[in-house]
């Protein structure tokens, strides 16, 4: 019995000590060490926990209220005759994990279009329909079932091209397995919210810089996309847009790569050779030409900072 008690106490002391060290680390970072270790990489102005969600059989967690877009609530399904409505879809990069609602590329794109417009009768409305973790299968299903009714003039997709519908490419998800994986990866609203809340902690991003390179030391087993292969789900989006007379834009999906000999901004190998079946908006060259460090453009390996969102918005505006 005494041994059990001592073990429990040891575990409790270990847990308390670890928690205290994390709190101290967070305080030290906030008091100035972050400025010494790439301060901009740890700046998190606001987090938007995705708490108002419901579980969908094939899409996983999605908005409980389809009319609630990030930064806007109770959007009317019927748009004004003079309005130009744009819907942005994608994963947490579109939703804007780690940045404020008005810093996402959707919000910045709306401001650019409003300022650029010479016809005051046109009101640009850019809706952020990004959902954490979404890939093309979920995006296509969400658009077809709920967002088509919002009568968009333009649909913008910023998403990973590693499409779960392509069984020849996807290694571990086929057919009925997808709903099971979605459920495993999205256990609860609480887990979803906690994950996004981590972006507010500077210590989390510092620890990621140590842990992630160790975790990713093994080679990526996902194959390069096959040249000429078409995305079935992107085709669904294109056909849905054609039915309602909307324009489809697909933005290049970027990742951070600042290792030895790396340019800082890369296109993931499984994104490079996809045949997109849509109007393509390249982003990598604009990111490289911005003259900013990877830490200024990405919060981690993939999520853009406010500056990164600004570049995406500017490049999208050039195509509209």
Image (tube, rainbow, N blue to C red):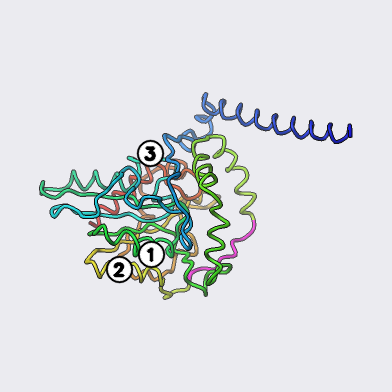
Residue 292 x %, y %: 40, 42
User: Residue at label 1?
Assistant: 140
At mark 1, the secondary structure is helix
Residue 100: give its label.
3
Is the Cβ of the residue at disc 1 closer than 8 Å to that at disc 2?
A: yes
Q: Which residues are magenta?
A: 218-225
At mark 2, the secondary structure is helix
Residue 181 x %, y %: 56, 61
- For mark 1, does the 10 Å Cα neighbourhood hold few (<14), some (14 to 19), or many (20 or more) residues? many
At mark 3, the secondary structure is loop
For marks 1 and 2, give the CA distance: 9 Å
User: Residue at label 2?
Assistant: 240
Is the Cβ of the residue at disc 1 closer than 8 Å to that at disc 3?
A: no
Query: Which mark sits nearer the N-terminus, 1 or 2?
Result: 1
Above or below for 171 versus 203: below
Residue at x 37% of width, y 68% of height: 234
Above or below for 73 versus 29: below
Residue 41 x %, y %: 48, 38
């Amino acid at each position: 019995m005494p041994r059990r008690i001592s073990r429990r106490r040891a575990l409790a002391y270990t847990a308390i000590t670890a928690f205290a060290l994390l709190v101290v680390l967070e305080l030290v970072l906030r008091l100035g060490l972050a400025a010494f270790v790439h301060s901009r990489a740890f700046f998190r102005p606001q987090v938007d926990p995705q708490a108002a969600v419901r579980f969908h059989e094939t899409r996983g967690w999605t908005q409980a209220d389809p009319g609630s877009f990030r930064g806007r609530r109770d959007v009317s399904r019927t748009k004004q005759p003079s309005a130009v409505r744009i819907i942005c879809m994608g994963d947490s990069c579109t939703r804007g994990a780690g940045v404020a609602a008005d810093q996402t590329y959707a919000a910045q794109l709306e401001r650019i279009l409003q300022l650029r417009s010479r016809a005051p009768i046109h009101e640009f409305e850019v809706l952020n329909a990004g959902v954490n973790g979404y890939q093309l299968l979920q995006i296509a299903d969400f658009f077809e079932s709920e967002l088509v009714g919002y009568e968009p003039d333009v649909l913008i997709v910023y998403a990973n091209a590693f499409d779960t519908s392509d069984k020849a490419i996807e290694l571990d998800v086929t057919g009925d397995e997808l709903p099971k994986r979605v459920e495993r990866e999205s256990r609860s609203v609480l887990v979803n919210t906690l994950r996004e809340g981590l972006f507010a902690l500077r210590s989390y991003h510092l620890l990621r810089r140590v842990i992630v390179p160790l975790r990713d030391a093994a080679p990526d087993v996902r194959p390069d996309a096959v040249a000429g292969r078409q995305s079935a789900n992107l085709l669904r989006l294109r056909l849905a847009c054609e039915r309602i007379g909307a324009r489809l834009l697909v933005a290049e999906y970027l990742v951070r790569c600042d290792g030895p000999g790396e340019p800082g901004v890369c296109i993931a190998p499984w994104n490079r050779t996809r045949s997109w079946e849509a109007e393509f908006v390249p982003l990598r060259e604009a990111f490289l030409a911005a003259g900013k460090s990877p830490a200024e453009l990405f919060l981690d390996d993939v999520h853009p900072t406010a500056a990164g969102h600004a570049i995406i918005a500017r490049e999208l505006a050039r195509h509209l």
